[in-house]
Amino acid sequence: MATQTESTGVSTDHSWKGGVLAGIAGGAVMAVVMLAMGANGVLGGAIPALYGLAPPLNPAAGLVVHVSHGAVLGVVFAGIVGAAGLDESAKVVGAGVVYGIATWVVLAALVMPVWLQTVGFPNAPPLPNFAPPSLLWHVVYGVVAAGVFTQTRDL
């Protein structure tokens, strides 16, 4: 495990670095799957609109925002995995599936519609927005992030 305690009693857990890389990888692969499935309006419209960067469609900003969210969520995932004491790769990947589902329910289905409605995005989805393609995208994120994290957690 990546956590050590020095004689000072200070934790030297640097798994957050692996979490950042894992989250970036998960967010990037998720974006590729989204684009392959024709979700250009989500990636170029809804995601950058969260921060007032769209409309009009702004795929570059959407990708930067999306991968940035992925990085932050990767650090959260690293913290959860560490707190749960998950050391086996299979358990980490299983946790990634659950994490992907949780991010879909909380962030995509509940938070994002409210946020987009609040900022006045004209194509804001309904609340709740339990869209099956989005579930697939978030599970892909969780699996990729977990797989990468198993390889980068000790950076």
Image (tube, helix red, strand yellow):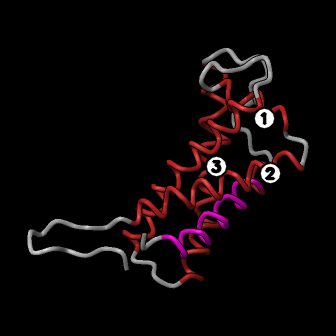
User: Which residue is rendered at x = 66% and y = 50% of the image?
Assistant: 104
Marks 2 & 3, CB-CB < 8 Å contact: no
Where residue 93 sits: x, y (%)? 61, 74
Q: Quadrant of residue 69?
A: top right
Considering the whole magenta stretch, tell me its main secondary structure: helix
Q: Position of residue 19 (x, y in %)?
A: 49, 60
- The amino acid at mark 3 is Val
- Of 10 and 110, which appears nearest the observer? 10
Q: Which mark is residue 105?
A: 3
Magenta-highlighted residues: 137-152
Judge whether residue 59 is colored magenta.
no
Q: Residue at x 73, y 32 (%)?
A: 60
Q: Nearer the viewer, mark 3 or mark 1?
A: 1
Is residue 146 visible in the rendered structure shown here? yes
Callout 2 secondary element: helix
Question: What residue lies at 51% left-to-right and 85% top-to-bottom?
Answer: 88
User: Seen in the image, is 35 located left or right of residue 102?
Assistant: right
Query: Label for residue 42?
Result: 1
- The image quadrant that residue 145 belongs to is bottom right
